[in-house]
């Protein structure tokens, strides 16, 4: 199964890319994907990651489906 992962802001800098096609197993959850990304892109390990699945926030136990798009980013604050 293949998904598209988009990295924004500091996560793009840490991963060294803005987009990656990633192969995952059927039944992979968002939590498992985050663990895989932290292993594959070690620069992400120090970031508190937020994520959206197909442009909507998702719970970590949400199962990812073939062709889904997962956006990875960090909290943004402003004033």
Image (cartoon, helix red, strand yellow):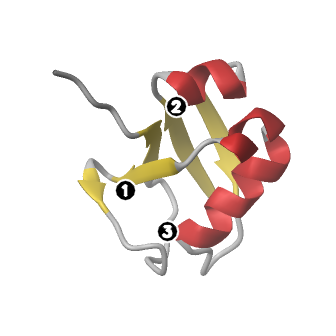
Nearer the observer: mark 2 or 3; the answer is 2
In the image, residue 15 sits, relative to residue 42, either above or below, namely above
Residue 19: image x %, image y %?
57, 27
Disc 1: CA contacts within 10 A as few (<14), some (14-19) or many (>=20): some
Quick check: can you spot residue 71?
A: yes
Give the spatial CA distance, label 3 vs label 1. 8 Å
Disc 2: CA contacts within 10 A as few (<14), some (14-19) or many (>=20): many
The structure residue drawn at horizontal position 60% and vertical position 81%, both measured from the top left corner, is 27
Q: Are marks 2 and 3 in contact (CB under 8 Å)?
A: no
Please give the residue where the numbered disc 2 appears in the rendered image. 7
Residue placed furthest toward the left: 79
Residue 40: image x %, image y %?
82, 44
Which quarter of the image is occupied by the N terminus?
Answer: bottom right
Which quarter of the image is occupied by the C terminus?
Answer: top left
Examine the image and state in which quarter residue 76 appears.
top left
Left or right: 23, with 55 as reference point: right
Please give the residue where the numbered disc 1 appears in the rendered image. 53
Q: Are marks 3 and 1 in contact (CB under 8 Å)?
A: yes
Please give the residue where the numbered disc 3 appears in the rendered image. 64
Residue 22: image x %, image y %?
68, 46
């Amino acid at each position: 199964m293949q998904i598209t992962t988009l990295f924004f802001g500091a996560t793009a800098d840490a991963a060294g890319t803005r987009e990656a096609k990633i192969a995952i197993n059927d039944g992979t959850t968002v939590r498992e994907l985050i663990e895989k990304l932290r292993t594959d892109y070690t620069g992400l390990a120090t970031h508190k990651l937020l994520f959206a699945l197909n442009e909507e926030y998702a719970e970590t136990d949400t199962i990812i489906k073939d062709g889904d798009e997962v956006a990875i980013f960090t909290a943004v604050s402003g004033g």
